[in-house]
Amino acid sequence: MSMPLLSLITFLPLAAAVLLIFFPKDRKRLLYGFALGVTVAVFAASLILYFGFDSAAAGPQFVERTAWLGFGIQYHVGVDGISLFLVLLTTFLLPLVLLSSWSYIRERIKEYLIFMLLLETGILGVFLSLNLFLFYVFWEAALIPMYFLIGIWGGKRRVYATMKFVLFTMAGSLLMLAAIFTLSSLFFKATGTYSLNVFDQARMVLNPRLQTWLFLAFGLAFAIKVPMFPFHTWLPDAHVEAPTGASILLAAVLLKMGSYGFLRFAIPLFPDAVERFLPVLSVLCLIGIIYGGLMALIQKDIKSLVAYSSVSHMGLVMLAVFSLNVEGTLGAIYQMLNHGLSTGALFLAVGILYERAHTRLIRDFGGVSKQMPVFSAFFLIAVLSSAGLPGLNGFIGEITCLYGVFAANKVYAALAVTTLILGAAYLLWMFQRVMQGPVTNEKILSFPDMSWREIACFAPIVVLMFWMGIAPRAFTGKMDASVTAYVHRIKGRERVFVQKAVPSPVSFRLDAEERLPR
Amino acid sequence: MRDLFWLIPFPPAASALALILFGRFLSRKWVTIQACGSVLVSFLLSIFSFAGLFGSAGESLPWIKILSPWIKAGAFGADFGFQFDPLSAVMVLVVTGVGLLIHVYSVGYMAHDKGYTRYFAYLNLFMFAMLLLVLASNMVLMFVGWEGVGLCSYLLIGFWFERKSASAAGKKAFIVNRIGDAGFLLGLLFLLTIVGSSDFTAINGAVRGGTIGGGLATLIALLLFVGATGKSAQIPLYIWLPDAMEGPTPVSALIHAATMVTAGVYMVARLNVLFGASGSAGDVVAIIGAATAVFAATMALTQNDIKRVLAYSTISQLGYMFLGCGVGAYAAGVFHLATHAFFKSLLFLSAGSVIHALSGEQDMRKMGGLRKYLPRTYPPFLVGAIAISGVPFLSGFFSKDAILTSAFAQGKTILWALGLAGAIMTAFYMFRLIFMTFHGPERISEEAKSHLHESPKVMTVPLAILAVFSIIAGYVGLPAILGEKADLFRRFLAPVISPAAEARALSIGAEGLLILASAGAAFLGIFVAYLFYIRSPHLPQALADRLPFVHKLLYNKYYVDEAVGAVVIRPLIRGSDLVYSGFDLKVIDGAINGSAAAAGFFGKALSFLQTGFVKDYAFAFLLGVALILGVFLF
Amino acid sequence: MTVPAGYFFVLSLVLFVLGIVAFFVKRDLISQFMAIEVMLNSANLAFLALARQAHFADAQVVVFFIITVAAAEAAIGLAIVLVIFRRRKSIRTADLNSLKG
């Protein structure tokens, strides 16, 4: 390991943010140029990850590990097939998000850019951390910039929305912190050493009752973030109030932190508890799919429509995660990326509309296609991608997810396919009311079509949508080994059953050749 | 030729891509050449491949070409693979042949439209998706084409999206199709998990090998058939097709008559081994088909919009195809698909010519006597009407008769009788259309009359070609009464259709009677139409007055759209609204805001302890220390 | 001659109690502040006595810490008192209750 690539990727935005403090605040071009340059550089660096990634290896790669605070708290980062594309998605979207903010953000540009860069560091840290404590630090750190982004640049009810957003997520993560400390002490009791490394922790076999409580603590934090029904109500509020750029990142990446948390932590650490809660969780997911779809159908604000569509889509993702098989997990990760692209694109489109009309209510629009044909094409592609049309990315994710769910439980799959119908219904109905029909509002006649800058934001996402729809193996190929190993770890674990009289809270096997690093 | 068949879908794809990306830089002439030329290339490739099938006797069928692996996730996988066999050949020839003629026709029809380039981009895209559908070697890729044609249908129905009705119709078509697709996808998932692959050869192998059979086969077949009812507009998902007439008329001809809507029939025929393995799935298909054939025909009886008559007619004819497949006569079903593609697209295009001539008028009550104004449209229109009515010696007669005969031979006498009743109605409403449009007194508005003109050659020549095919296409599938080898079409398809699924033979006498019955039905329908609309034109009104309830019911299409709105859509929206305001905002957010308010309340309540005086705090501090010390010491 | 450690402890205790009493009796911030200093130093005394008796150097280190902290506290505390006086023209604790909930 010659270059600390992951640290570079993670902390370059942070360093840039610090540097930005010293920039003059009214030189818009300079500020944007610098921030854009940095995010593009981060993306370029993350591409090295993609090309250097060994798709045959299941374990984490590009690992960096140094002592930090002691007591098992290490700076330990690495990327594997599960996190690789989430990292890439983040670094890919950030420059586009900044570019899309050019005309939307009119005041406090410098601060806006600083918070965006801080947010990138936070998110990347979450996806790269292999140490529970480090993960927690980044998890919370990502929350703070988002709080400011919505709170300062948001809409009218931004204070309510940010409070709700922060309190929801904080409530979840507080319990998670307690659970992390519990795990740490349990591990010490079992082995006499401290480790918060997720892979070490996953080898600890906890008794099911303990697992249940710890899982609930972790699961709550993640479920709120996803968000799973019934913890979803913060999402529409946050989205409606957030500026376009923050909305894109919130939907495209921040929500993935929740589903990623399940994949990386909650499920591998507490497999017995997951198994026990599987029916409840799956039913919640199914409710989320249908409920989110129905709620999206009747929203009057385009943004909250897209927000509820996220609830629905993430419901499918989580359902696939809980199918606990290779296809479902792979599909879930793929669908996470798809959802990131399609929902990001949808929010981008809504932002473009909002900049022209200064409203997001569906009834204020009508016949926009006539005035903005290029935009109409992009918007339609985003809509179709979100609706899972074959040929675009959404389809591959959806069908793979459904395959996994179907293989695990046919009834769940039968209920989950309603997403196909509902997704088409709410998206196309919205598209019809906003973009088609006669022009209802004189203001629409003065809308200019997309500018080159807006096309530059949108086009890369669209290209990627087609690419992921036509050549999915460029992506799934890299995930395969890690996902397969993940599923084998869960399926092939040592099972502990309640009825077996094992009173000790922790039992731990240490094989001679598998000694833990001290 | 073996190696080239997989190229068939790609010329239109390339053309569509070019038109979408660079269309604004291309001249109208170039757009025309490119759009039509690409389909011509596909058509030529299809002919070569078709010819190749004959030269390759003994070679194993189907030809398979795997371009590259596509999806791979654990046990789930699918390839970019194409296959070619007689069934694909028939479909490909129909799609590219009719498609080519409709492309050419569109050059004239859309000549004055601002969206000329966009139109041809969509049309080319449709050709690609449709060819992908019929050439895919596995069901996942087929599903891509399946949804792709749905997308193009959505785009083309809503082509004039400034019209609210057009955009609503497009959306409706897509969503209703999605309902079917959900069922289709479930069936596909069953196949994928059980067979471990969605290749048609693997599926057939699994069914033949007994992996899938009995109830499971029925379940899968019926789930897939749900998809077919959506795409091919059968009961109960037919409701989108009449609305789809909002699209340009050539689109109605290509997508909503000749090709896309037959995808369901193609799928059932393609999976005939599976449908045959299930005892009752075929019955369901046949019953739905026959019911749709009659039900849609009754609705066509009273419509006044020329395109809507044809739309209900299409639904009805698709019902016949399913009836054929359902009783095991897959070859007959596909045969009807092919002949129907000719005469129905002919009818639509002729209707388009009429509409074009009348500057967009579609109401038959405002036509009449057009025969002398449209001398080059009338004959082909008449040929199409005769063909679809089942008058002997034209294509529709042979294919419809083959289906009805098979139904009868299978002992499904009721279905046969339904089909026959439908045939009478078909002849009636088609000739009602002809008489109202071309005969009788002129009821044309002055405005339309001043612009009245025959369509240009680019539109009428395709009509003539289609008319020729509508006459002769039937002769490749002559009835068995003329000898064992008369049915060339069935023999051609034999390698694809599992022989056990075919109908058993009837005696010559019985078959002769059936043929006479079919022919009689056609003539009866035509005669009644003549009676009603030429001899004594007051009769329809008199009949409507005598049976007001029936007339109202038919005229309003059994109020199905209204019922769907009242029973499904509005309750769904209103219920969601209630849940949103009642549950999401009140219960969940109420709980959240309530707990926030509760925290605030307790904070207020306890705030009396917070006096703000340092000494009070210090005193509390002292008390605390004393307390702790006390615990430790005592 | 050595003084027994107990004497130091008694002295420390007396100082500490004096500090507490002074804190509650006095009404101005400066005096209360001085009372706190007395308490801190009584604690220092106890630490040092312990260190000498047990020959234990750690306690002396703690004393250094306390002295440092006390110094910092004095610097900031007095500054705060000054600011309060400037604003309120009073440093009587009875006048200061803006932290009331």
Image (cartoon, coloured by chain):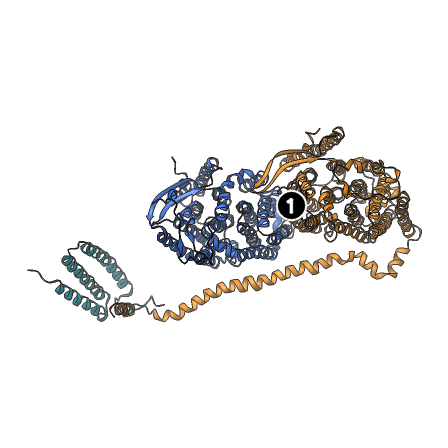
Residue A505, located in which quarter of the rendered image?
bottom left
Residue nearest the viewer, comparing B344 with B1: B1
Question: Which color is chain C depicted in?
Answer: cyan
Q: Which residue is mark 1?
A: B191
Q: Nearer the viewer, residue B199 or B214?
A: B214
Looking at the image, residue A33 sits to the left or right of residue A374; the answer is: left
Q: Secondary structure at mark 1?
A: helix
Quadrant for residue C5, please give it: bottom left
Q: Quadrant of the N terminus of chain C?
A: bottom left
Answer with left or right where residue C48 lies relative to residue B506: left
Query: Between residues B522 and A239, which one lies in front from this camera angle?
Result: B522
Q: Colour of chain A?
A: blue
Give the chain of mark 1: B
**In this rendering, does residue A23 appear at all?**
no
- Looking at the picture, tell me which residue is in the foreground, B293 or A149: B293
The answer, for residue B256, to whether it is visible in the render is yes
